[in-house]
Image (cartoon, rainbow, N blue to C red):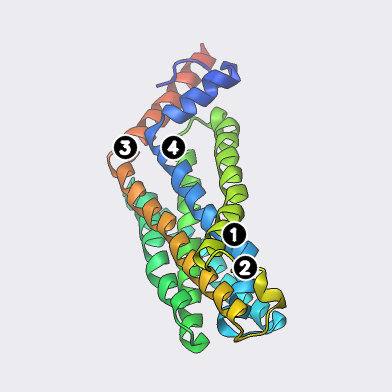
Amino acid sequence: MLHRDPAELSLPRAIRYVLRVPTNRVMIVISSLGWFFFATVRTFGVIFMRGHFGLGQSAAIAVLAVAGLGGLAGVLIGGRVSDALIDRGRINGRIIVAFVGYGLTPLLLAPAIALDALVVSLPLLVAGTLALGAANPPVDAGRLDVMHHRLWGRAEGVRTLVRTWAEAAAPLAFGWLSQELGGGTGSPFALEGAARGSPAADQASSGLRDAFLIMLVPVAAGALIGLRTRRTCATDVATAARSEEATRAADEE
């Protein structure tokens, strides 16, 4: 618990404190895993849609836009549900929503990616992005619940640094993985110049599909890792509240 104004902490000490809070550490990790997957979709989603479903550029973008609407709806729903659980006294309500969201995401997106029929895959894509979107607001809000308000900026800086690394690494890791799964020559960008149905296009499409399926594993891992906060969330929230009271009392002296 903090007994002094955290604004007076040096940056190294503030970072050490931020990373010592168990719930905050877990939330940084699971948030980064979610953004790791999102970065691959953002980079290779249109190429995958074109190769896997045989869509044109405009149609592929339209399909992703529809799936994105599910993500937007999930953001609103996840925030509302997590707040409602907190209002009802469920201190770990945000963790519950995040766990359900991250847990459902691979279950919904895996068949959507594996199936060849867009009419079946599209509803699953929308539902999967809704689940992924619903997990993000509770995780973001939960980090604030367990941190003194005078550390929010530095805590968010740590989280943003880790998330940025994950987002930067994701396209590189995905590109390498899809090429290896495509037989070593099936670059994702081979779809851009190859005729549909040609060996090169089929190889690249297969590599993309399998890589996307593997990239769902970190999302599932995020759900399991998030379970660890069930034991720490209430304690960390209470510690943050007591730290606020202690530093407020010190300010009044």
Instruction: Single out the mark in the foreground, 1 or 4.
Output: 1
Does 132 sit left or right of 22 as displayed? Answer: right
Please determine whether, in this image, residue 97 is positioned above or below residue 113.
above
Mark with earlier residue (4, 2): 4
Earlier along the polypeptide chain: callout 2 or callout 1? 1
Task: Indicate which disc residue 232 carries.
Answer: 3
Local secondary structure at mark 3: loop
Between marks 3 and 2, how big is the CA–CA gap?
42 Å
Q: Circles 3 and 1: CB distance less than 8 Å?
A: no
Q: CA distance from mark 3 to mark 1?
A: 37 Å
Q: Residues within 10 Å of mark 2 (few under 14, many from 20)?
A: many
Q: Quadrant of the N terminus?
A: top left
- Say the numbered circle drawn on residue 175: 1
Work out whether mark 1 precedes mark 4 in sequence or the reverse, and give the earlier one.
Answer: 4
- Give the residue number, with chain letter if any, for mark 4: 24
Q: CA distance from mark 2 to mark 1?
A: 7 Å
Residue 127: numbered disc: none
Q: Nearer the viewer, mark 3 or mark 2?
A: 2
Closer to the chain start, of discs 3 and 4, is 4
Q: Earlier in the sequence, mark 3 or mark 1?
A: 1
In percent of width and height, residue 218 lies at 43, 54
Question: According to the image, label 2 marks what residue?
Answer: 188
Spatial separation of the CA atoms under disc 3 and disc 4: 10 Å
The residue that appears at 44% across and 20% down in the rendered structure is 2
Q: Which residue lies at the image location 54% right of the left edge and 67% below the top edge? A: 71
Amino acid bearing label 1: Gly
Q: Secondary structure at mark 4?
A: helix
